[in-house]
Image (tube, helix red, strand yellow):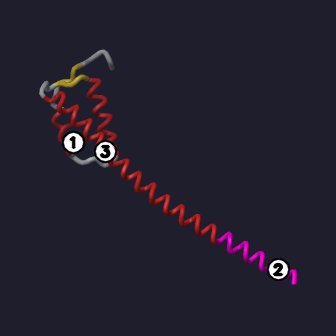
Amino acid sequence: MIEKIIGTIITFLLTTALGYCASSLKTYKENAKRTKDNEKIQNQALLTLLQNSLTNTFFMYESKGEIPDYVLKNWLNLLKAYEALDGNDYVHTLATKMSKWKIVKTDIL
Protein backbone atom coordinates (compact mmCIF):
# COMPACT_ATOMS: atom_id res chain seq x y z
CA MET A 1 0.00 0.00 0.00
CA ILE A 2 2.74 2.46 0.96
CA GLU A 3 4.66 1.53 -2.17
CA LYS A 4 1.64 2.38 -4.29
CA ILE A 5 1.31 5.81 -2.62
CA ILE A 6 5.02 6.53 -3.06
CA GLY A 7 4.83 5.40 -6.69
CA THR A 8 1.85 7.69 -7.29
CA ILE A 9 3.63 10.63 -5.64
CA ILE A 10 6.79 10.05 -7.68
CA THR A 11 4.77 9.79 -10.91
CA PHE A 12 2.90 12.98 -10.03
CA LEU A 13 6.13 14.86 -9.25
CA LEU A 14 7.87 13.68 -12.42
CA THR A 15 4.88 14.57 -14.58
CA THR A 16 4.65 18.01 -12.97
CA ALA A 17 8.40 18.60 -13.40
CA LEU A 18 8.30 17.54 -17.08
CA GLY A 19 5.28 19.76 -17.71
CA TYR A 20 7.06 22.70 -16.10
CA CYS A 21 10.19 22.05 -18.18
CA ALA A 22 8.18 21.85 -21.40
CA SER A 23 6.34 25.07 -20.55
CA SER A 24 9.60 26.83 -19.68
CA LEU A 25 11.19 25.68 -22.92
CA LYS A 26 8.25 26.97 -24.94
CA THR A 27 8.42 30.34 -23.15
CA TYR A 28 12.19 30.48 -23.71
CA LYS A 29 11.79 29.83 -27.43
CA GLU A 30 9.09 32.50 -27.73
CA ASN A 31 11.25 35.02 -25.87
CA ALA A 32 14.29 34.14 -27.99
CA LYS A 33 12.30 34.73 -31.18
CA ARG A 34 10.93 38.01 -29.84
CA THR A 35 14.44 39.10 -28.85
CA LYS A 36 15.80 38.21 -32.28
CA ASP A 37 12.97 40.12 -33.98
CA ASN A 38 13.59 43.13 -31.74
CA GLU A 39 17.29 43.00 -32.51
CA LYS A 40 16.58 43.04 -36.24
CA ILE A 41 14.28 46.04 -35.82
CA GLN A 42 16.84 47.88 -33.69
CA ASN A 43 19.65 47.16 -36.15
CA GLN A 44 17.52 48.45 -39.03
CA ALA A 45 16.70 51.60 -37.07
CA LEU A 46 20.37 52.14 -36.23
CA LEU A 47 21.36 51.54 -39.84
CA THR A 48 18.85 54.17 -40.97
CA LEU A 49 20.08 56.69 -38.39
CA LEU A 50 23.69 56.10 -39.43
CA GLN A 51 22.83 56.49 -43.10
CA ASN A 52 20.93 59.70 -42.34
CA SER A 53 23.84 61.16 -40.37
CA LEU A 54 26.40 60.19 -43.01
CA THR A 55 24.29 61.64 -45.80
CA ASN A 56 23.57 64.89 -43.94
CA THR A 57 27.24 65.43 -43.19
CA PHE A 58 28.14 64.76 -46.80
CA PHE A 59 25.69 67.32 -48.16
CA MET A 60 26.65 69.85 -45.49
CA TYR A 61 30.23 69.97 -46.81
CA GLU A 62 29.75 69.00 -50.46
CA SER A 63 29.41 72.56 -51.79
CA LYS A 64 32.67 73.58 -50.06
CA GLY A 65 34.62 70.62 -51.37
CA GLU A 66 36.45 70.45 -48.06
CA ILE A 67 35.84 68.97 -44.66
CA PRO A 68 37.41 69.53 -41.23
CA ASP A 69 39.62 66.67 -40.08
CA TYR A 70 37.61 66.00 -36.92
CA VAL A 71 34.36 65.80 -38.91
CA LEU A 72 35.98 63.41 -41.38
CA LYS A 73 37.29 61.22 -38.54
CA ASN A 74 33.81 61.02 -37.02
CA TRP A 75 32.28 60.36 -40.45
CA LEU A 76 34.69 57.47 -41.06
CA ASN A 77 33.86 55.98 -37.64
CA LEU A 78 30.16 56.18 -38.47
CA LEU A 79 30.90 54.53 -41.81
CA LYS A 80 32.62 51.61 -40.05
CA ALA A 81 29.54 51.09 -37.87
CA TYR A 82 27.33 51.37 -40.95
CA GLU A 83 29.38 48.71 -42.73
CA ALA A 84 29.32 46.44 -39.66
CA LEU A 85 25.51 46.45 -39.94
CA ASP A 86 25.77 45.48 -43.62
CA GLY A 87 24.97 48.95 -44.95
CA ASN A 88 24.57 49.13 -48.71
CA ASP A 89 26.82 50.84 -51.24
CA TYR A 90 24.86 54.10 -51.34
CA VAL A 91 27.05 55.63 -48.65
CA HIS A 92 30.18 54.21 -50.29
CA THR A 93 29.41 56.39 -53.31
CA LEU A 94 29.50 59.39 -50.98
CA ALA A 95 32.77 58.17 -49.45
CA THR A 96 34.34 57.96 -52.91
CA LYS A 97 33.32 61.54 -53.65
CA MET A 98 34.56 62.73 -50.24
CA SER A 99 37.97 61.17 -50.81
CA LYS A 100 38.61 63.92 -53.40
CA TRP A 101 37.85 66.76 -50.96
CA LYS A 102 40.42 68.88 -49.20
CA ILE A 103 40.86 68.00 -45.54
CA VAL A 104 41.05 71.11 -43.36
CA LYS A 105 43.49 70.58 -40.49
CA THR A 106 42.30 71.82 -37.12
CA ASP A 107 43.83 71.89 -33.67
CA ILE A 108 41.06 69.63 -32.36
CA LEU A 109 42.78 66.38 -33.36
Secondary structure of the residue carrying tag 2 is helix
Q: Is residue 92 above or below residue 99?
A: below
Q: Residue furthest left?
A: 63
Tell me the kind of residue under disc 1. His
Give the tally of numbered discs.
3
Q: Earlier in the sequence, mark 2 or mark 1?
A: 2
Q: Quadrant of residue 23?
A: bottom right
Picture coordinates of residue 102, whole percent (x, y): 17, 24
Q: Earlier in the sequence, mark 3 or mark 2?
A: 2
Instruction: Please give left or right for residue 12 compared with residue 31 in the image.
Output: right
Secondary structure of the residue carrying tag 1 is helix
Label 1 crowd bin: few (<14), some (14–19), many (20+), radius 10 Å: few
Tell me the kind of residue under disc 3. Leu
- How far apart are labels 3 and 1 at the CA level? 14 Å
Q: Residue at x 21, y 37 (%)?
A: 55
Q: Residue at x 40, y 56 (%)?
A: 37
Q: Which residue is mark 1?
A: 92
Q: Which residue is mark 2?
A: 5
Instruction: Please give left or right for residue 83 compared with residue 6 in the image.
Output: left
Instruction: Please give left or right for residue 108 compared with residue 22 in the image.
Output: left
Q: Which residue is mark 3?
A: 47
Picture coordinates of residue 57, whole percent (x, y): 23, 31
Label 3 crowd bin: few (<14), some (14–19), many (20+), radius 10 Å: many
Specify the principal SS of the magenta part.
helix
Of the residues tagged 3 and 2, which is closer to the observer? 2
- How far apart are labels 3 and 2 at the CA level? 62 Å
Tell me the kind of residue under disc 2. Ile
Q: Is residue 18 above or below residue 27?
A: below
Q: Quadrant of residue 63?
A: top left
Q: Provide the residue span drawn in magenta.
A: 1-18
